[in-house]
Amino acid sequence: MSKTILVVDDSATMVMSLKASLEMAGFKVETAGDGVQALSKLKSGIKPDLIITDINMPNMGGMDFIRNARTLPGLRFTPILALTTESQQTKRDEAKKIGATGWLVKPVGGTDLVKVIKQVLPGA
């Protein structure tokens, strides 16, 4: 059974490249352009095994998205990776506090990404 990953990023290029890498690694990929869109997908019944979110996005950024996603039933323990150009420790700590599982700094190669996913997602 292939695992589903929800990719949330306002950059279409980033979404395309992540989707390509993840699909090549055998994952099913759902995408959203910002936190608002991602939350509505989650509320409509998408059950991702893992979420990858950008931090700086219009409408609803990654931090607010993570905070909101963690309140949804069934998403309390879903791994959430923040994938961002931000590398400040304070941001990382804040993300961890609100429920992010891991933090990756862009650009991240497909193989590195898949390695991290395998660490946080049992059976991937």
Image: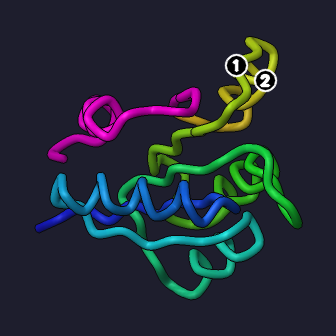
Q: Secondary structure beneath disc 2?
A: helix
What amino acid type is highlighted by mark number 1? Ser
At 32% across and 40% down in the image, what residue appears? 110
- Tell me where residue 49 sits by quadrant: bottom left
Q: How many numbered discs, if any?
A: 2
Percent x, y for residue 25?
Answer: 18, 52
Q: Is residue 51 left or right of residue 120?
A: right
Quick check: is 113 in the magenta stretch? yes
Residue 9 in the image: above or below residue 104: below
Secondary structure under the numbered disc 1 in the rendered image: loop
Give the side of residue 15 with respect to residue 53, left or right. Answer: left
For label 1, the residue is 87
Which residue lies at the image location 45% right of the left edge and 44% below the top edge?
79
| Residue lying furthest left | 1
Tag 2 residue: 91
Q: Is residue 118 magenta?
A: yes
Segment colored magenta: 102-124
Quadrant (top left/top right/bottom left/bottom right) for the N terminus: bottom left
Whether pointer 2 and pointer 1 mark residues with C-beta atoms closer than 8 Å, the reply is: yes
Q: Amino acid at mark 2?
A: Lys
Residue 93 vertical placement versus 15 (above, below): above
Residue at x 74% of width, y 56% of height: 65
